[in-house]
């Protein structure tokens, strides 16, 4: 019996709208793609979410991906707060599960710096029974350790949990640990999948 709903944050409860920020900064075409490849689409972005390195080290690592775009990368870095916008349904969605008696948790790849810059976009965090962000433990999804830490910290049984995430690799990692998974493509589709799981 499922008792716990575990939410990813980015692209599930908030929009990670980095594309909009880059476009608002005037980055288009090839420049847009090159800045994206050097930042949010680079392996260094996982290290940003891990937050084991200092902000200065992360920024230097991003710049090292495309030294010729240093000024553009720094400009994006300075406007990172604009990359997170809460979805209008987020708080009500979490509240609805709480009212039905489910416990709700967060498991999210989220950097320390971005959390500090965008915490006002996460009001639903107050409704949660617990939260684990990658920056707090220097682990990132889909690494098994971060799921295990969440389960152990809140004494959760995998078979009583369902995890909602927009990344298929993250969902697959949860399922390998015995957690039910829902791949998020839209709130409506997620609700259909959840209804099936919650009533079996």
Image (tube, helix red, strand yellow):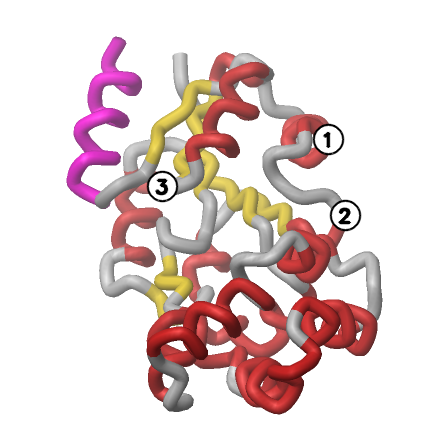
Q: Which residue is pictured at 34% across the width and 48% down the height?
A: 94
- The quarter of the picture where residue 48 lies is bottom right
Question: x%, y% of residue 4?
Answer: 45, 29
> Real-space Cα distance between discs 1 and 2?
10 Å
> Real-space Cα distance between discs 3 and 1?
27 Å
- Is 167 situated above or below 156? below
Q: Nearer the viewer, residue 1 or 14?
A: 14
Task: Specify the segment rendered in magenta.
Answer: 187-200
Badge 1 vs badge 2, beta-carbon distance below 8 Å: yes
Is residue 62 shown to the viewer in this render? yes
The kind of secondary structure element at disc 3 is helix
Question: x%, y% of residue 131?
Answer: 59, 47
State the mark number for residue 145.
Answer: 1
Q: Nearer the viewer, residue 194 or 52?
A: 52
Question: x%, y% of residue 96?
Answer: 27, 44
Q: Is residue 197 magenta?
A: yes
- Is 146 situated above or below 134? above
Q: Is residue 125 magenta?
A: no
Q: Which residue is mark 3?
A: 98
């Amino acid at each position: 019996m499922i008792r716990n709903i575990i939410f990813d944050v980015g692209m599930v409860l908030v929009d990670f709208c980095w594309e909009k920020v880059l476009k608002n900064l005037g980055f288009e075409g090839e420049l847009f793609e090159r800045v994206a490849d050097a930042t949010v689409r680079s392996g260094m972005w996982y290290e940003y979410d891990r937050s084991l390195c200092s902000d200065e080290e992360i920024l230097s690592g991003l710049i090292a991906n495309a030294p010729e775009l240093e000024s553009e990368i720094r400009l994006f870095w300075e406007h990172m707060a604009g990359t997170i916008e809460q979805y209008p349904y987020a708080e009500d969605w979490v509240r609805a599960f709480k009212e039905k008696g489910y416990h709700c948790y967060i498991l999210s790849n989220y950097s320390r710096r971005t959390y500090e810059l965008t915490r006002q976009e996460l009001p639903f965090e107050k409704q949660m029974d617990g939260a684990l962000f990658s920056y707090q433990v220097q682990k990132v999804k889909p690494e098994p350790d971060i799921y295990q830490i969440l389960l152990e910290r809140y004494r959760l049984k995998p078979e009583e949990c369902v995890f909602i995430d927009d990344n298929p690799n993250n969902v697959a990692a949860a399922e390998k640990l015995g957690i039910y998974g829902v791949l998020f493509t839209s709130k409506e589709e997620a609700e259909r999948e959840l209804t099936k799981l919650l009533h079996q």
